[in-house]
Amino acid sequence: MELHEIILSRHSVRDFSEEPIKDSELEIILEAGRLAPSAQNRQCWRYIVLQDRSNIKSFARHIGLLGTVNFFIAGAPVVIVACAEPKRSTKLNGQDYYLVDTAISFQQMMLAAWSLGIGSCWLAAFNEGSVRKYLGIPDNIRVVGISPFGYPRDKKSLYSIAAKSFAGSNKRLAKEQIITKEKWNF
Protein backbone atom coordinates (compact mmCIF):
# COMPACT_ATOMS: atom_id res chain seq x y z
CA MET A 1 0.00 0.00 0.00
CA GLU A 2 1.21 3.51 -0.77
CA LEU A 3 1.46 5.96 2.15
CA HIS A 4 -1.44 8.04 0.86
CA GLU A 5 -3.65 4.94 0.70
CA ILE A 6 -2.61 3.98 4.22
CA ILE A 7 -3.54 7.40 5.58
CA LEU A 8 -6.87 7.48 3.71
CA SER A 9 -7.93 3.97 4.72
CA ARG A 10 -6.67 3.72 8.32
CA HIS A 11 -9.43 3.61 10.91
CA SER A 12 -9.87 2.53 14.50
CA VAL A 13 -10.24 -1.23 14.85
CA ARG A 14 -12.04 -2.68 17.86
CA ASP A 15 -12.70 -6.24 16.64
CA PHE A 16 -9.69 -8.51 16.21
CA SER A 17 -9.21 -11.96 14.75
CA GLU A 18 -7.49 -14.65 16.79
CA GLU A 19 -4.49 -14.60 14.43
CA PRO A 20 -1.31 -13.63 16.29
CA ILE A 21 0.97 -10.90 15.00
CA LYS A 22 4.23 -12.30 13.64
CA ASP A 23 7.36 -11.23 15.53
CA SER A 24 8.81 -9.84 12.29
CA GLU A 25 5.73 -7.63 11.82
CA LEU A 26 5.80 -6.47 15.43
CA GLU A 27 9.44 -5.49 14.95
CA ILE A 28 8.50 -3.38 11.90
CA ILE A 29 5.82 -1.63 13.97
CA LEU A 30 8.16 -0.97 16.91
CA GLU A 31 10.95 0.21 14.62
CA ALA A 32 8.59 2.74 13.02
CA GLY A 33 8.01 4.22 16.48
CA ARG A 34 11.69 4.18 17.34
CA LEU A 35 12.59 6.13 14.20
CA ALA A 36 10.04 8.92 14.73
CA PRO A 37 11.17 12.54 14.92
CA SER A 38 11.19 14.32 18.28
CA ALA A 39 12.03 17.78 19.58
CA GLN A 40 15.83 18.04 19.76
CA ASN A 41 15.91 14.28 19.05
CA ARG A 42 15.22 13.60 22.75
CA GLN A 43 13.28 10.35 22.07
CA CYS A 44 11.45 10.50 25.40
CA TRP A 45 9.01 7.71 24.53
CA ARG A 46 9.00 4.30 26.17
CA TYR A 47 6.74 1.40 25.18
CA ILE A 48 5.42 -1.59 27.09
CA VAL A 49 4.36 -4.43 24.79
CA LEU A 50 1.84 -6.94 26.12
CA GLN A 51 1.56 -10.21 24.16
CA ASP A 52 0.50 -12.76 26.75
CA ARG A 53 -3.26 -13.28 26.22
CA SER A 54 -4.04 -13.80 29.91
CA ASN A 55 -2.05 -10.70 30.84
CA ILE A 56 -3.88 -8.64 28.20
CA LYS A 57 -7.25 -9.83 29.54
CA SER A 58 -6.23 -9.00 33.09
CA PHE A 59 -4.86 -5.62 32.00
CA ALA A 60 -8.18 -4.82 30.28
CA ARG A 61 -9.96 -5.39 33.61
CA HIS A 62 -7.51 -3.27 35.61
CA ILE A 63 -7.05 -0.05 33.69
CA GLY A 64 -9.55 1.85 35.77
CA LEU A 65 -13.10 3.13 35.77
CA LEU A 66 -12.73 5.06 32.51
CA GLY A 67 -11.04 2.06 30.95
CA THR A 68 -14.08 -0.16 31.36
CA VAL A 69 -15.36 1.16 28.03
CA ASN A 70 -12.26 -0.32 26.44
CA PHE A 71 -12.84 -3.94 27.45
CA PHE A 72 -12.50 -4.89 23.78
CA ILE A 73 -8.71 -4.73 24.05
CA ALA A 74 -8.91 -8.11 25.79
CA GLY A 75 -9.42 -9.67 22.34
CA ALA A 76 -6.28 -8.19 20.79
CA PRO A 77 -3.12 -10.28 20.32
CA VAL A 78 -0.92 -7.30 21.23
CA VAL A 79 -1.46 -4.22 23.38
CA ILE A 80 1.10 -1.44 23.44
CA VAL A 81 1.22 1.15 26.19
CA ALA A 82 2.85 4.41 25.10
CA CYS A 83 4.72 6.12 27.92
CA ALA A 84 6.95 9.17 28.10
CA GLU A 85 9.69 10.38 30.36
CA PRO A 86 8.99 14.15 30.53
CA LYS A 87 12.44 15.01 31.91
CA ARG A 88 14.06 13.47 28.81
CA SER A 89 11.99 15.81 26.65
CA THR A 90 12.07 19.57 26.29
CA LYS A 91 9.75 22.48 26.84
CA LEU A 92 9.51 25.11 24.10
CA ASN A 93 7.16 28.09 23.92
CA GLY A 94 5.71 27.03 27.27
CA GLN A 95 4.71 23.64 25.86
CA ASP A 96 5.82 20.21 27.04
CA TYR A 97 6.93 18.25 23.99
CA TYR A 98 6.86 14.77 25.51
CA LEU A 99 3.17 14.50 24.54
CA VAL A 100 3.79 15.63 20.97
CA ASP A 101 6.85 13.45 20.51
CA THR A 102 5.20 10.32 21.90
CA ALA A 103 2.05 10.91 19.84
CA ILE A 104 4.11 11.20 16.65
CA SER A 105 5.99 8.00 17.48
CA PHE A 106 2.82 6.09 18.37
CA GLN A 107 1.06 7.28 15.19
CA GLN A 108 4.00 6.07 13.09
CA MET A 109 3.57 2.67 14.73
CA MET A 110 -0.13 2.66 13.87
CA LEU A 111 0.52 3.61 10.25
CA ALA A 112 3.22 0.94 9.92
CA ALA A 113 0.80 -1.60 11.41
CA TRP A 114 -1.95 -0.64 8.97
CA SER A 115 0.46 -1.03 6.05
CA LEU A 116 0.80 -4.66 7.19
CA GLY A 117 -2.97 -5.14 7.51
CA ILE A 118 -2.85 -4.80 11.30
CA GLY A 119 -5.41 -2.56 12.97
CA SER A 120 -5.13 -0.41 16.07
CA CYS A 121 -7.20 1.99 18.14
CA TRP A 122 -5.76 4.94 20.09
CA LEU A 123 -7.16 4.87 23.63
CA ALA A 124 -7.14 7.80 26.00
CA ALA A 125 -9.98 6.65 28.29
CA PHE A 126 -7.99 4.94 31.02
CA ASN A 127 -7.00 5.63 34.59
CA GLU A 128 -3.31 6.50 34.48
CA GLY A 129 -2.79 5.57 38.14
CA SER A 130 -4.33 2.13 37.60
CA VAL A 131 -2.24 1.52 34.47
CA ARG A 132 0.88 2.72 36.27
CA LYS A 133 0.19 0.41 39.24
CA TYR A 134 -0.68 -2.65 37.11
CA LEU A 135 2.44 -2.34 34.94
CA GLY A 136 4.85 -1.12 37.62
CA ILE A 137 5.46 2.21 35.89
CA PRO A 138 7.43 4.66 38.05
CA ASP A 139 5.94 8.02 39.09
CA ASN A 140 8.27 10.03 36.85
CA ILE A 141 6.83 8.38 33.70
CA ARG A 142 3.55 9.47 32.07
CA VAL A 143 1.18 7.10 30.29
CA VAL A 144 0.28 8.91 27.06
CA GLY A 145 -1.87 6.33 25.27
CA ILE A 146 -2.75 2.68 24.85
CA SER A 147 -3.54 0.75 21.70
CA PRO A 148 -4.51 -2.80 20.89
CA PHE A 149 -2.97 -4.19 17.70
CA GLY A 150 -4.30 -7.08 15.65
CA TYR A 151 -5.72 -8.23 12.36
CA PRO A 152 -9.25 -6.83 11.93
CA ARG A 153 -12.09 -9.30 12.19
CA ASP A 154 -14.44 -9.22 9.19
CA LYS A 155 -17.64 -8.93 11.21
CA LYS A 156 -17.94 -5.88 13.46
CA SER A 157 -19.45 -6.28 16.90
CA LEU A 158 -22.41 -4.22 18.07
CA TYR A 159 -20.06 -2.49 20.53
CA SER A 160 -17.68 -1.54 17.70
CA ILE A 161 -20.50 -0.12 15.60
CA ALA A 162 -21.86 1.86 18.57
CA ALA A 163 -18.40 3.13 19.58
CA LYS A 164 -17.68 4.32 16.05
CA SER A 165 -21.00 6.16 15.95
CA PHE A 166 -20.52 7.66 19.43
CA ALA A 167 -17.01 8.83 18.58
CA GLY A 168 -18.21 10.35 15.31
CA SER A 169 -15.36 8.62 13.51
CA ASN A 170 -16.76 9.34 10.05
CA LYS A 171 -17.16 13.05 10.68
CA ARG A 172 -14.22 15.11 9.46
CA LEU A 173 -14.07 18.87 9.29
CA ALA A 174 -13.82 20.40 5.83
CA LYS A 175 -10.37 21.66 4.83
CA GLU A 176 -11.65 25.23 4.94
CA GLN A 177 -12.46 24.76 8.63
CA ILE A 178 -8.92 23.75 9.58
CA ILE A 179 -6.60 25.32 7.01
CA THR A 180 -5.93 28.97 6.27
CA LYS A 181 -3.11 30.46 4.24
CA GLU A 182 -0.65 33.18 5.13
CA LYS A 183 -2.39 34.23 8.39
CA TRP A 184 -5.09 33.23 10.87
CA ASN A 185 -8.34 33.65 8.97
CA PHE A 186 -11.05 31.55 10.59
Image (spheres, grey):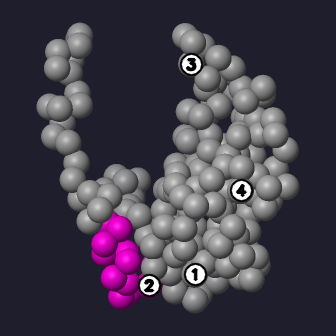
Which residues, given as a range, are shown in magenta?
A: 152-164
Residue type marked 3? Gln
Q: Is residue 52 above or below residue 111?
A: below
Quick one: which residue is furthest to the front in this view? 65
What label does residue 130 carry, if any? 4
Label 3 vs label 2: CA separation? 39 Å
Give the mark nearer the N terminus: 4 vs 1: 1
Position in image of residue 25 (x %, y %): 64, 70
Residue type marked 2? Arg
* Viewer-nearest of discs 4 and 1: 4
**What residue lies at 52% left-to-right and 75% top-to-bottom?**
72
Residue type marked 4? Ser
Residue 109 visible to an observer of this rendering: no
What label does residue 95 carry, if any? 3
Label 4 vs label 2: CA separation? 29 Å
| Residue that mark 2 sits on | 153
Give the mark nearer the N terminus: 2 vs 1: 1
| Residue that mark 1 sits on | 75
Give the mark nearer the N terminus: 1 vs 3: 1
**What residue lies at 72% left-to-right and 34% top-to-bottom?**
43
Label 1 vs label 3: CA separation? 36 Å
| Residue 86 on the magenta span | no
SS class, disc 3: strand
Label 2 vs label 1: CA separation? 11 Å
